[in-house]
Image: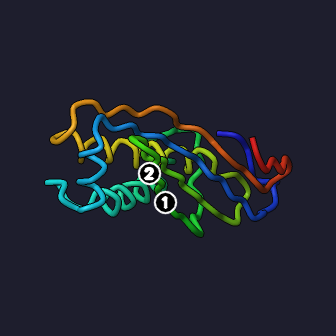
Amino acid sequence: MVDITQKQNTHRTAIAQAVVKVGSIKTIEAIKNRTVPKGDVFEMSKAAGFIGIKKTPELLPDCHPLPIEHAAVAYEISGLEIIVNVTVKTFYKTGVEVEAMHGASTVALNLYDMLKPIDKEIEIHTIKLLQKTGGKSDIKNF
């Protein structure tokens, strides 16, 4: 792990995005109407994303355990694509980019898992960092 003992705590934010493409408008309708057999897809996936964010240092050996001060999951439907944005905030010595991307990945995987009984054409397309603020390099947009 990188030595962060001499670093100062600063407010840090990261926003990551995942794009999940479904195979049919019927799948989108099932999500909106909450008729997916496994339950409320967006609420369950949001909960899974929060677990993914919190468990990041347990799964990725170079990530520091850090306090998560805020996490949010937002969805947007565009045609057959579900756009997932995950925001993570902390006040700590190191950033939360990996936590945000891990959260977005977990949300996307949970969407896949919950939708696979009704749609065999689901694809996870993009997982990327959209925004990072805080720390020495204050990068606001990529």
The type of residue carrying mark 2 is Ile
Q: How far apart, in angstroms, are the residues tagged by discs 2 and 1?
A: 13 Å
The type of residue carrying mark 1 is Val
Q: In this rendering, is residue 83 above or below 73?
A: above
- Left or right: residue 57 versus residue 138 is left
The residue identified by callout 2 is 77
Position of residue 81 measured from the top left corner of the image (x, y, whole percent): 43, 42
Work out which quarter of the rendered image holds the N terminus and state it: top right
Q: Secondary structure at mark 1?
A: strand
Position of residue 90 measured from the top left corner of the image (x, y, whole percent): 65, 64
Residue 25 shows which numbered tag?
Answer: none
Task: Tell which residue pokes out farthest to the bottom in this image.
Answer: 69
- Left or right: residue 127 versus residue 3 is left
**Crowd class of label 2 (few under 14; some 14 to 19; many from 20; radius 10 Å):** some
Position of residue 32 measured from the top left corner of the image (x, y, whole percent): 30, 59
**Crowd class of label 1 (few under 14; some 14 to 19; many from 20; radius 10 Å):** many
User: What residue is at 44 percent from the left and 51 percent from the top?
Assistant: 77
The residue identified by callout 1 is 73
User: What residue is at 26 percent from the left and 46 percent from the top?
Assistant: 27
Q: Quadrant of residue 118?
A: top left
Nearer to the camera, 20 or 64: 20
User: What residue is at 70 percent from the left and 66 percent from the top?
Assistant: 91
Nearer to the camera, 78 or 109: 78
Q: Quadrant of residue 37?
A: bottom left
